Image: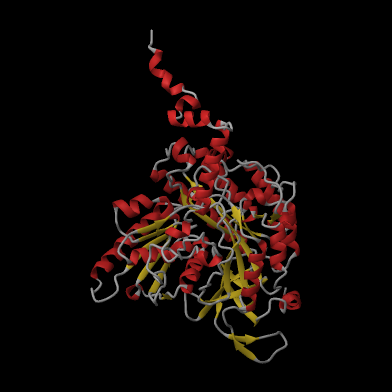
Amino acid sequence: MRNTNRLRPIFLTFEQWLPRWSLQHRLCCSKPVSVHSNEESRADKFKTQIATGPRFHYFVKGASINKQQPVITDDLIDTDKHAYLPEDSESGNSRTVCFETYGCQMNVNDTEIAWSILQKKGYQRTSDVAEADVVLLVTCSIREKAEQTIWNRLRQLTAMKKRRLKTRVPMKIGVLGCMAERLKSELLEREKLLDVLAGPDAYRDLPRLLSVAHGGQQASNVLLSLEETYADVMPVHHSPQGYSAFVSIMRGCDNMCSYCIVPFTRGRERSRPVSSILEEVHILSEQGVKEVTLLGQNVNSYRDTSEEQFCSSEPGQLSRGFRTVYRARPGGLRFADLLDRVSLIDPDMRIRFTSPHPKDFPDEVLQLIKERANICKQIHLPAQSGSSTVLQAMRRGYSREAYLELVDNIKRIIPGVSLSSDFISGFCGETEEDHLQTLSLIREVRYNVGFLFAYSMRKKTHAFHRLQDDVPAEVKQRRLEELICMFREEATKVNSALIGRTQLVLVEGESKRSAQDLCGRNDGNLKVIFPRQEVAGQPTDTHTSPINPGDYVLVKVHFHSAVAVSYDVFYHTESQQDFSLSIILYV
């Protein structure tokens, strides 16, 4: 039997625990004192000590210290100051920074946000890597090939850094974006190729990170945020021609497709407040920008809940036959509302959006695209596969039949719409029959533009943990080539229908094929090549003038290929609205 006597001291009453002198004092008092009152007085005394003791700012460098209880004011709370860094250490001091951007349009926008933040801190921008004090690579992790490109570039920059003269400021190398979040350990610890690492939600922290790096230490911040949209950061648009700009409206993705790394590198979906978006588009319009592309990983799932008036109990509508892996979210100002407001800002400004998910195309969005003249009649509709079996394994939330029903609905509501898509060849478990179904889908839909890739498994994804990458590399490549051939064949047929038709084209600049030609894009986002020449501003004008980037030109097709068409030019103007009558005359 256990000896329980040893355990008795643990269960002493409060009276037994008190020292003997305390008990005697309590018994001799003329007025009895309860144990509870003693406890309360001690608690009150402790609270008083806490309330009158030193506050957090007492321990912060530079804070005023008084014997009296300090009063914390706004000037003492400065989240932009870091007491462990020297004063003015976050200033760029005219250091030069060079950005190299890889991957999608979101990375282009991220570059503009990061540059806006650094520019305010006194950094200067250069396009010459050899002259840069800081080189920042804005990276992509969507495929292995994209990451390998960055690894190779980092080794080149490291060699350049070692060759730099000691009399010059040491070069600092940083990686921003998706690859920073995904491969932080390998980049910082194993390879030791860089000084700064910043994830997609940490660009505000770049001045501090660079300050730490200039002090000789590696610095990183790859924390993902549930709220960061950079709504108060006005991007510095760096388009060479200045005619086109990207505007980010949301960040992150909740779809959790089994092949996709984006939810793990860019975090959960959150939408930028509509007021911030409209302000930026207004500014771009005043600057003469002629085309704005609204950006997001799942751009048409936009849902702004920043204002109480946007909140309601009604869930958002999905395309018929589509579903999500998450519960329907009620309330918020939706994509159709945003698209409507943006398109009304400037009738001469073309509006595009990318990259959408097929599930978020309710009829109200399609009707708005049809009715609003400056919303381009071009829709990116990523299919990824033509096989319902593969689509289920991909966790796309729809079948082949539902996708084709959506395509029919889009073509019915928006006649002449231009469609583009993404396809992956050789996904986990894909059979030859699955591959043939994808080929038949391309043939049936007849896309104008396509983006096709062989499957590349990414760590952290659902496929990495649950599926087998069992399609051999050579089979993936062969299937990819067959998809490309099918796409080109069908795109050529679609583009042949444009011969002899009049198109409105926004001029981008000089063609890469010849200095004698200019290039631009039509409403359907098809690349257009036409001769550099002086043409009239209106059909009735006798005076001619050169065509400049940002001009609209009216052209007629006389040659086409799968990816580009060639035109004769009729006339040009700076306003899209000037063509409304003339197109009717020429068609």
Q: Quadrant of residue 309?
A: bottom right
**Residue 76 x, y percent position in the rendering:** 51, 65
Give above or below for 493 relative to 390: below
Pick the residue in front: 313 or 57.
Answer: 57
**Residue 201 x, y percent position in the rendering:** 50, 57
The residue at 50%/27% (across/down) is 14
Can residue 474 be seen here? yes
Pick the residue in front: 418 or 144.
Answer: 144
Quadrant position of the C terminus in the picture = bottom right
Q: Quadrant of residue 324?
A: top right
Pick the residue in front: 252 or 28.
Answer: 28
**Residue 159 x, y percent position in the rendering:** 26, 65
The residue at 46%/24% (across/down) is 16
Can residue 394 be seen here? no
The residue at 55%/62% (across/down) is 230
Give above or below for 135 relative to 581: above
Q: Is residue 180 left or right of residue 30?
A: left
Give above or below for 51 relative to 542: above
**Residue 110 x, y percent position in the rendering:** 50, 63
Pick the residue in front: 18 or 307.
Answer: 18
Q: Is residue 465 left or right of residue 312?
A: left
Q: Is residue 123 left or right of residue 268?
A: left
